[in-house]
Protein backbone atom coordinates (compact mmCIF):
# COMPACT_ATOMS: atom_id res chain seq x y z
CA UNK A 1 0.00 0.00 0.00
CA UNK A 2 1.36 3.38 -0.99
CA UNK A 3 1.11 5.51 2.14
CA UNK A 4 1.16 8.88 0.37
CA UNK A 5 -1.59 7.82 -2.00
CA UNK A 6 -3.98 6.70 0.73
CA UNK A 7 -3.33 9.41 3.34
CA UNK A 8 -6.23 11.61 2.28
CA UNK A 9 -8.64 8.69 2.21
CA UNK A 10 -7.62 7.67 5.73
CA UNK A 11 -8.06 11.21 7.05
CA UNK A 12 -11.47 11.63 5.42
CA UNK A 13 -12.62 8.24 6.72
CA UNK A 14 -11.41 9.04 10.24
CA UNK A 15 -13.27 12.36 10.19
CA UNK A 16 -16.38 10.61 8.89
CA UNK A 17 -16.41 8.29 11.91
CA UNK A 18 -15.27 10.88 14.48
CA UNK A 19 -17.51 13.85 13.65
CA UNK A 20 -20.80 12.18 14.74
CA UNK A 21 -19.33 11.80 18.24
CA UNK A 22 -19.70 15.55 18.72
CA UNK A 23 -23.42 15.27 18.04
CA UNK A 24 -23.94 12.02 19.95
CA UNK A 25 -22.71 13.72 23.12
CA UNK A 26 -25.50 16.28 22.84
CA UNK A 27 -28.12 13.53 22.50
CA UNK A 28 -26.94 11.41 25.44
CA UNK A 29 -26.73 14.42 27.73
CA UNK A 30 -30.49 14.42 28.22
CA UNK A 31 -30.41 10.79 29.35
CA UNK A 32 -27.48 11.43 31.69
CA UNK A 33 -29.21 14.45 33.19
CA UNK A 34 -32.26 12.33 33.99
CA UNK A 35 -30.27 9.41 35.41
CA UNK A 36 -27.78 11.36 37.55
CA UNK A 37 -30.04 14.29 38.48
CA UNK A 38 -27.47 16.87 37.33
CA UNK A 39 -28.24 20.31 35.93
CA UNK A 40 -28.12 20.98 32.20
CA UNK A 41 -25.55 23.73 32.65
CA UNK A 42 -22.92 21.22 33.80
CA UNK A 43 -23.25 19.25 30.58
CA UNK A 44 -23.22 22.42 28.50
CA UNK A 45 -19.97 23.40 30.17
CA UNK A 46 -18.49 19.95 29.54
CA UNK A 47 -19.39 20.15 25.87
CA UNK A 48 -17.84 23.59 25.51
CA UNK A 49 -14.70 22.51 27.38
CA UNK A 50 -14.33 19.43 25.18
CA UNK A 51 -14.63 21.43 21.98
CA UNK A 52 -12.38 24.22 23.27
CA UNK A 53 -9.65 21.78 24.31
CA UNK A 54 -9.86 19.99 20.95
CA UNK A 55 -9.53 23.25 19.01
CA UNK A 56 -6.77 24.57 21.29
CA UNK A 57 -4.81 21.33 21.04
CA UNK A 58 -5.14 21.29 17.27
CA UNK A 59 -3.98 24.92 17.10
CA UNK A 60 -0.94 24.20 19.28
CA UNK A 61 -0.02 21.14 17.22
CA UNK A 62 -0.24 23.28 14.09
CA UNK A 63 1.67 26.28 15.43
CA UNK A 64 4.57 24.28 16.79
CA UNK A 65 4.59 21.79 13.90
CA UNK A 66 4.93 19.08 16.52
CA UNK A 67 3.87 16.24 14.26
CA UNK A 68 6.52 17.18 11.70
CA UNK A 69 9.32 17.28 14.27
CA UNK A 70 8.57 14.05 16.09
CA UNK A 71 7.19 10.64 15.28
CA UNK A 72 3.41 10.79 15.02
CA UNK A 73 3.06 7.66 17.14
CA UNK A 74 5.16 9.17 19.95
CA UNK A 75 3.26 12.46 19.86
CA UNK A 76 -0.17 10.87 20.21
CA UNK A 77 1.04 8.25 22.67
CA UNK A 78 2.44 10.92 25.00
CA UNK A 79 -0.63 13.11 24.54
CA UNK A 80 -2.87 10.25 25.63
CA UNK A 81 -0.64 9.57 28.62
CA UNK A 82 -1.14 13.17 29.74
CA UNK A 83 -4.91 12.78 29.61
Image: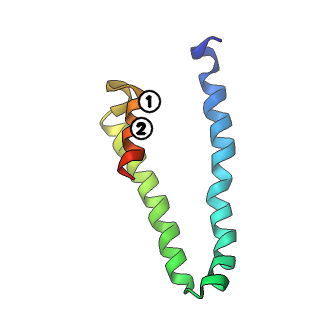
The percent position of residue 43, horizontal first and vertical second, equals 54, 76
- Cα separation, mark 2 vs mark 1, equals 6 Å
The image shows residue 18 at horizontal and vertical percentages of: 63, 47
Going by the image, does 70 lie left or right of 9?
left
Label 1: element kind: helix
Instruction: Give yes or no for contact between labels 2 and 1 (Cβ–Cβ under 8 Å).
Output: yes
Q: SS class of the residue under badge 2?
A: helix
Q: 26 or 59, which is in the foreground?
A: 26
Instruction: Classify residue 19 as left or right of residue 63.
Output: right
Query: Quarter of the image containing the N terminus?
Result: top right
In terms of image quadrants, where is residue 2?
Answer: top right
Given residues 62 and 50, the one toward you in this image is: 50
Q: Dot 2, how many residues are within 10 Å of its Cα: few (below 14), some (14-19), or many (20+)?
A: few
Circle 1 residue = 73
Badge number at residue 59: none
Q: Residues within 10 Å of mark 1 (few under 14, many from 20)?
A: few
Q: Residue at 63%, 41% (x, y): give it.
A: 15
At 68% across and 44% down in the image, what residue appears?
A: 17
Quick one: 49 or 83, which is closer to the camera? Answer: 83
Say which residue appears at 38% left-offset and 31% top-offset: 74
Q: Position of residue 49 (x, y in %)?
A: 44, 65
- Residue 43's place in the image compared with 13, above or below, is below
What residue is rendered at 38% in x and 46% in y?
81
Kindly indicate the quadrant of the structure image that contains residue 20.
bottom right
Query: Where is mark 2, residue-wise?
Result: 77
Amino acid sequence: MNVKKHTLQVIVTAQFFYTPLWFVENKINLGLIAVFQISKSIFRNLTVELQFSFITGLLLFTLFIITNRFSLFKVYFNRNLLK
